[in-house]
Amino acid sequence: MDHAATAPRRLLITGASRGIGRAAALIAAAQGWPVAVNYRQDRAAADAVVAAIAAQSGQSVALQADVSDPAQVEPLFDAAEAALGGLDAVIVNAGIVAPVMKLAQMDDARLDRMVRVNVLGSLYCAREAARRLPRPKDQPPAAILLMSSASARLGSPGEFVDYAATKGAIDTLTLGLARELGSENIRVNAIRPGLIDTDMQADSGIPDRAFRMAGNIPMGRPGTADEVARAAIWLVSDAARYVSGAILDVSGGR
């Protein structure tokens, strides 16, 4: 086996206290990667992730920051680099969804927060990663992974077109940034999860939404956080060293 393909990566994951971010942190740590676990407000959940990693003799640290606030993003990256001795990869995962409704019913506060967290938060984190991850071409490339959604191509009509629109922006960011950073030896990719059984479904107001809509999934079931996270970790690993500008659907064929 090519040793470089399995070399440890110093990894920062935003929104890693639950769901896909949590699953990615656990998988990365199980492979021997040092992980910075970012969270916004649930310190207990982030500490539980760190404790689970420590139980596997892994290295991790919980770091609080609201990625929608640009003043908190630079200190987050500073703390991650200090704790891990540098960074090789960043998974920009933090995001929100809101209760199901039509656009005409949505108020300004909802739209503002959706854009600030999902679009601006991703831009702030991607910008900071772009500033810190460049490296010589004779080294393994650094990696940025952005979390999109199948809603970016489906539109989510009657549910949350605002969320879908923000994820469309992530797709475009992925394509442009991959071309922009290729010469800096940084790979940029995205994942579009489909209907995934995570706590985030409860934020839509329909906790069992993924199961209710299982009939729309060719594979006949919702996905798991672990299934998305395994794809994410592969994309930021050296096993995917020539993959950049890709948007991978993890959606059961939907």
Image (tube, grey):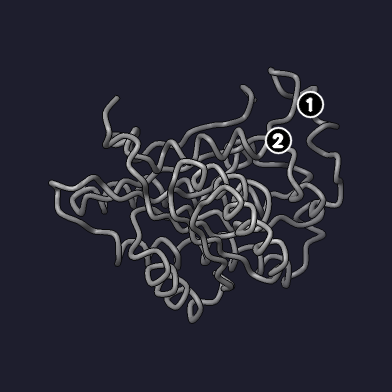
For the N terminus, the image quarter is top left
Of mark 1 and mark 2, the one earlier in the sequence is 2
Alpha-carbon span between mark 1 and mark 2: 8 Å
Residue 195: quadrant of the picture: top right
In the image, residue 181 lies at what x, y percent? 26, 53
Neighbour tally class for label 1: few under 14, some 14-19, many 20 plus, Cα within 10 Å? some
The numbered disc on residue 34 is none
Q: Relative to 9, is 133 above or below?
A: below
| Horizontal relation, residue 139 to residue 149: left or right | left
Is residue 95 visible from the viewing direction of this image? no
Under mark 1, the amino acid is Ala
Number of numbered discs: 2
Q: In percent of the image, x 35 and y 36: which residue is there? A: 6
Q: Secondary structure at mark 1?
A: helix
In the image, residue 99 lies at what x, y percent? 81, 55
Q: Nearer the viewer, residue 133 or 80?
A: 80
In the image, residue 81 lies at what x, y percent? 38, 68
Q: Relative to 187, is 223 above or below?
A: above
| Horizontal relation, residue 29 to residue 112: left or right | left
Q: Secondary structure at mark 2?
A: loop
Residue 238: quadrant of the picture: top left
Q: Which residue is mark 1?
A: 214
Whether residues under marks 1 and 2 lie with C-beta atoms below 8 angstroms apart, the answer is: yes
Q: In percent of the image, x 53 and y 48: which residue is there? A: 147
Q: Nearer the viewer, residue 18 or 191?
A: 18
Q: Relative to 219, is 162 above or below?
A: below
Q: Nearer the viewer, residue 120 or 161?
A: 120
Under mark 2, the amino acid is Leu
The numbered disc on residue 195 is 2
Residue 218: quadrant of the picture: top right
Is residue 50 visible from the viewing direction of this image? yes
Q: In percent of the image, x 61 and y 45: which residue is there? A: 23
